[in-house]
Structure formats: structure tokens, C-alpha cells
Amino acid sequence: MKHYLLVDFGSTYTKLTAVDLDKEDIIATSKSITTVETDIIEGYEKALHQLYQVMGKPIIFDKVVACSSAAGGLKMAAIGLVEELTTEAAKRVCLGAGAKVELVISHHMNKSEVQKIMDKNIDIVLLAGGANGGNQECVIHNAKMLAKSDVKAPIVFAGNKDAIDEVTDILKDANKDFYICENVMPKLNILNIDSAKDTIKEIFVKNIIEAKGIKKVEKVVDRVVLPTPHAVLMAAELLSKGYQDEIGFGDLMLADVGGATTDIYSMAQGLPSQMNAVLSGLEEPFAKRTVEGDLGMRYSALGVLETFTESEIHQLSLKNIDLLDACTKRNLDIEMIPLTDMDKKIDDILAKRSVEVATSRHVGTLKGVYTPMGMMYHQTGKDLTQTTYYIGTGGSIIHSEDPVSILKHGAKLTSKPMELRPHRPKYLLDQSYILSAMGLLSMDYPLIALKIMKKHIVELEEKQDAGNE
Amino acid sequence: MKSIVIGVIGADVHAVGNRIIEYTLTREGYNVVNVGVLSTQEDFINAAIETSARLILVSSLYGHGELDCRGMRDKCNEAGLKDVLLYVGGNIVVGKQDFNDVEKRFKDMGFNRVYPPGTNIEDVMDTIKKDLGDL
């Protein structure tokens, strides 16, 4: 095997990365608009044509693998019992599998919540609830509600193991498409992601891409194997942990500011770094992903606008920036490419804010408690203060003239002292936009994928005049 | 296996007694769900919901138990845990007070059993088993 072609069918762009395995390097990359509404192959062939032009000649690829977040990505509903426990665990499984969590339901489902599963066109339902040996009654109620409904989406059961037999009977009698997995929270505060995550991946490959009209691309590519964010997660984990003798980067964070969402990833244990902090709540996964559906550069620009205060908007207007107008324009024209200095500046402002807010929602927090033994802290979530690297990816950061100034908003902020953000990270850039491709490549050739990432993800220099913002 | 939720409530970090309770109850055949030190009422209650616990055993050693436990029964009722048993024990009030008064105050707050300082978990085992229908 010599040449691999890795394809990412994104919501907006279809991105191609050609790799020479012998040279352990990228040969070329290209992109074209994703054409899932008409025929997804069109966009792919355009991008391929471009790729050949860059390379100067067409070549035969030994293998073509793809990931996809086209046609709305993978939309999931996370159902659990207590909001902070099994519901949160279910949510984390969905995010770890590369899905968008469109619906979160706790406790006993009612009819209107079941209706929402259908209204939102949920692709997969994850049904959890109860620790093993604990509550069964709620998850059985919820299984019955799904059984009675017209929900056609596959149901992944990952709740209390004691309820498996009854839930199986209920769903089988109703002819539902369902899968039984290990409990997402087998014991209190213990998170068990892998079993349900693997099943979701399987369903994605088997059913979802077919339903979304992506499957037909398998006429020209070998296989669509993962949702794109799952591929990015795999790449980031590999980059952090290393492989065999090739050492990784250690603890790192990653921000991907897209048009519709902002994704933040962290690869770290996140245990307390200070003596007087006590962990509370559900266990955190080493490879964690959060997605903010209200923060994005185009489709979700109005969501970013909402995070600005009146006075901030006023301050910007003094610099001739009409933020409301700019965000509305971006929301309506999601393919807009910034050409003027002003549009570039506004894109930077939106990207900075997206990184800042999304990082706030991702990192853990401290809460002080006065005790007879002095000040103690409750730590909820991951302590990422010691994170060594903060990586930027996604068009808005890659194409910015000053990516460091955007990524800096993911680091420690004096205005948010209780948030456990990286204190002094080094800033890196995925300049060739290869993370998802390397995640795909790592399934067959982890060592080569790691070497390529270490070569192409470059450290950024801080600009001298960056202080005036 | 029946579940029992244990932990140390409030801004209290006394961890040793809590471990002894966990050890003893486990040995007696219970599924012990330990929410640990520095726990809030919600930590106990959420754990009890997910594990279908019949008993919540609250420890407090630093004297502020009365403040920390207030309203816990109401929250249990709100969370659908109407029948859950609530035990509390340790140095649960400030200073040396008549324990009969203390017991009454905690029972008025909705606790089923209240134990004074120095009570060993072994001495309570029979009561626990009786309350859970195991004796």
C-alpha cells in the first residue's frame, strides 16, 4: 500500500487529503462544496479533480476512507434519570461518538418529549437510567413510551443492566430497531463510554449514512466509517498520548470553530492540580468533547451575538462595527467568505468570542467552601490549568491573520478566576486542516498519522502588536 | 443487593469514619454507595435515585450538621423518595447539648434515626437490618 485518500464530507465542504505512506507525508489537499442535497459524489469528484491538478497528475489510491458530518451530522437524543448523573453520562457518550445532542431528557418521559424525538428528526436515541442494581422503573417506563410511539430511529439501551430483559421484551414486541449495551454509569459517578459509543459508530455506518444519502458515495470511496467529530477525537487522542516509541504532545486542548457549532476537545485526566480541591460529580473522560450549537461563525452567528452585552455592542459601534447587522448577514449567507478588512475583523471578533464562551462551558470550575480546616474547593469537571498545548482548527481560525489572538481567549482569564482554563499553553495551528483525515488514517496506520500531525500542526508565534485589542 | 447511600455532609472533610462505615456495611452484604466528603444534600439524593437506595446515612463531624441537614426530607419528598429512610450521626450540633433535645430537633426535620457522638456503626447494624427488613 502506498497511497491513501482521506475524505471528510463536512456540512459545508468536502475535504480531501492524499497521503503517501512510504514518505509518511501529505501529498496534497483540496476542497469543494459538499453536494449532499443533489448527489454527494458531485462535490467529491470536483474536489478530486482539484486534487489531481495540485498533484499534476491523477494517481490510483490504494484505499479511500471517509468520515462525514454532512446532512446535519449525527443527531442524537440522550435520555437518562438524574440530570447530573445518567443523563449527563448519556450526553457524554453521544458527544464522544461524534454526535450532536439535539435533545436531552431526564426522568420519566412524557408524550410531548417523545413527540420531540420525531419532530427533531433524531437519528439515534440513547436510552440510559439507573446504576446497575439501582433504579429500573424509570428506564422501563421510558422504554414503554418509546415502544408505544412512532419513533423509527434506532434505540441504544445503555441503562441499568437489571432492566435489560424487560426492556428487550418491550422493544422487541413493538418491533423497534434496538441495541443493548453496557450501562453508561454502572456505578455512581463512574462513566463507561466505550460500549455504547462503539454501537453508535456501528449504527452510523450501517444505517445513518444510508438514510442521509451519503451511502451512495461508497460507489467511489471504499467506506464511510465515522462521524467527523469522532475522527477528530481519535486524532487528538493519538496526538496527546503518542504511539509506541513516538511520543505525543501530552495534555492538550483543541478548538474547532465552525459555521454552525464550536467544538472543544480536551485530552487530559483533569484531576485537581491543587491540594485543597475535592472532585465532585460524574467522572470525566480522558478524551472529552463538548459542542456548542449556539456558537458559530455563520449559521449560529446570532447565538454569538447574544453573548455580547449592550455596552460591548456599543463599544464596537464606536469602531464602526454594527455587530447585529454583521451577524444577521452571516446567518443569512452561510457561504460568505470575508474579503474586506472589516469582514475579516468581525470574523475574528466572533471567533474569539466563540472560543472564549465554548471554553468556559468545557472546562471544570472551582467553588470555594469555608471549612474549619480552612478554605476548600469543590472541583466540578476537568482541571485543565496545566494543559501544555491549545490547538486551533476550523476555517475561521486557520484563515485568520492572527490565530493566536483568537486562541488566547481559550486560556486563563482574570475575569473568570474560578474556571480551570489552561494557564500558559503554547498555541498550535492545524494549518493544513488535516485532523479529521489523520483520525481516519490512524485506524490503519497510527504511527504514520502521528508523525504527519507532529509535522503539520505547527507552533504559532505571538504577534508583537497583539496587545491592543 | 440493597443499596445504602453514605457520605459526609456540608463543608466537612472527615473521611476516616466514613470509610469505616463503608467497610462495615459492605461486609454486611449491602451495596454501599459512598458520595464521600464535602457532599451536598443533592449529592446524597441523586445517588439514592439512581441506585434505588432505601436508606441514606448522613455523617457530620464538624458541628454544623443541623444547618446542613435542614430541608433534606423536603428535598427527598420533592425527588420522589418519599419512603427513603434518613439516618444521621456524628458530632451533629455545636458544643455539648442534651442529646434528647438534639434527637427531637432532627426527628422534627424528618430524620428517622439520630445518633450521638461516639456511636459505632456495629452497634447500629441490627437497627439498619430491621429497618430494611433483613432481620
Image (spheres, coloured by chain):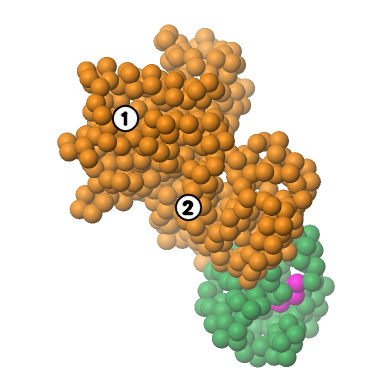
> As shown in the figure, which amino acid type bears the numbered disc 2?
Asp
Secondary element at image label 1:
strand
Chain for colour green:
B
Q: For the magenta stretch, what is the residue range?
A: B84-88
Q: Residue B123: x, y in percent?
A: 65, 91
Q: Are marks 1 and 2 in contact (CB under 8 Å)?
A: no
Chain letter of disc 2 in the image: A
Q: Is residue A135 visible?
A: yes
Q: Which residue is mark 1?
A: A17
Q: Which residue is mark 2?
A: A198
How far is mark 1 from mark 2, CA to CA?
25 Å
Residue B109, placed above or below residue B23: above
What is the quadrant of residue A137 in the picture?
Answer: bottom right
Chain for colour orange:
A
Q: Is residue A262 visible?
A: no
| Image side of residue A13 versus residue A326, left or right | left
